[in-house]
Amino acid sequence: MDIYNSSEIWFVTGSQHLYGEETLKKVNEDSEVITGYLDRAKDIPVKVVFKPVLTSADAITGLCSQANHDNKCIGLIAWMHTFSPAKMWINGLKSLTKPLLHFHTQFNRDIPWQDIDMDFMNLNQSAHGGREFGFAGSRLRLERKVVTGHWKDNNCIEDIAIWSRAAVALADTKKLRIARFGDNMRDVAVTEGDKVSAQIRMNYSVHGYGVGDLVKECNDISEKDIGNLIEEYGDSYRVEDKDILKSDFLKDAARIEIGLRNFLVRGEFKAFTTTFEDLHGLPQLPGLAVQRLMAEGYGFGAEGDWKTSALVRSMKVMANGLDGGTSFMEDYTYHLEPGKNAVLGAHMLEICPSISGERPRLEIHPLSIGGKEDPARLVFKASPGTGINASIIDLGNRFRILLNPVRVIECPDMPKLPVASVLWEPAPNLKTAATAWIIAGGAHHTGFSTALDQRYLHDFASMTGIEIVDIDEDTRIEKFKDELRWNEMFFHFTTRMA
């Protein structure tokens, strides 16, 4: 994704003039070394940029202002090499609008027991300099991530890498435009929401269009372009029935894909929604087009679900370049065999092939809903492994992200259900997970990923100020209810719906 190439994180170090020029020179040199190490770390996907050591309130405030107005800067990593009085940081941190990571590290890994003296102690004061900086953040009620450990420790690098991906996703939301073709699926509640509050809280904007706008774009596609795309289909997927490649149904699917992609590119949209209740003028439900666009990084939500569309896009940004895939998903039906409870995740058509464990098959089958022609789709099963389901809902006074880790298992053959699918066992078990999900108001639409885990979405939620709730191996229903009650009180007193 281009946004990774144009993003950078600034490494800033706090100190003070009390220690003299020689010490400050050493602080500056050590900061450059750590910055270079982080910048070269293969797991950190963006450039890490060194900034000169900060020793005054004016310098700190000025740097935070620069960060706010620099489009490349997606966040700050702050390190206190020495003691840096917290009052110097107040005005700068008050004004900071970019994500902040407090790296509580020190230059030396070990204490040099035989050589340690007061000069060494004066220089290497991260242990209490970090606490002073931490107080400033807590006193300001500032959301930030704290990573503790030596700067060469792989666990620290991993934590910074995860946070940096969340920061890229946040930066992406500030330019994220969602195209919504048609309205919400009629009478459905959970896919509705306050678009103005979402834009204030999560930055992205939702733009509604009649399906006729898409139809017009599709009608302008040439036969040559359609033929070229069908040839690409034949090269990219398993086609067991070669007559499909000559089918008018596949031509219609290709026409829709080209038209939809042209519309999204022209409008600079990175996410979109459709609904099978508003297809007037389209010969079939966009299925193949949605699957292929999601594979390219677009967010998608079915039935007008713009919140999930945005969430899927952000998850795709965070997962860029990682092993595994990310898709729009729906909990479709349960397998309740004793001792083998599982969830079958699928949708009518729109599941991203990035989660596939096999080369997808290109097929055409009736849909039995929507009253349109037989749509083309990619049919596959997801790879076994670990994954995460994430749902975002509008509670009226705030947004909530609900997370549930899952174990993806082998899905039996379903010869009469030719759709993309994934079978999973939710943590801690289906009974507890489904009960907690319902109590928390989780939607039937989710962002599903085998590339991400809870940590990425926790960092993302922290940056946006969204409530986040976990259903995992430690979940117990009565304690879970208490957590929701406590959250209700916290958000009632500390935030307001924008």
Image (tube, rainbow, N blue to C red):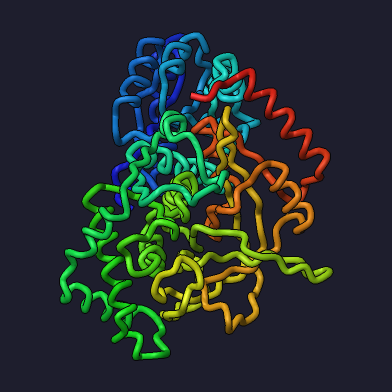
Q: Position of residue 389 (x, y in %)?
A: 60, 54
Is residue 49 positioned above or below 184 on the image?
A: above
198 or 94, which lies in front?
198
Q: Position of residue 482 (x, y in %)?
A: 78, 33
Q: Position of residue 257 (x, y in %)?
A: 30, 66
Could you tell whether 51 is left or right of 453 in the image? left
Q: Residue at x 40, y 11 (%)?
A: 56
Q: Position of residue 333 (x, y in %)?
A: 66, 65
Q: Residue at x 22, y 58 (%)?
A: 216
Q: Residue at x 80, y 71 (%)?
A: 337
129 or 293, which lies in front?
293
Could you tell whether 335 is left or right of 442 in the image? right
Q: Residue at x 38, y 55 (%)?
A: 298
Please identify the quarter of the rendering in which residue 396 is found: top right
Could you tell whether 233 is left or right of 420 in the image? left
Task: Give the number of callouts.
Answer: 0
325 or 258, which lies in front?
258
Please identify the quarter of the rendering in which residue 485 is found: top right
Residue 105 visible in the snapshot: no
Residue 71 visible in the snapshot: yes
Is residue 88 positioned above or below 261 on the image?
A: above
Please identify the quarter of the rendering in which residue 281 is found: bottom left
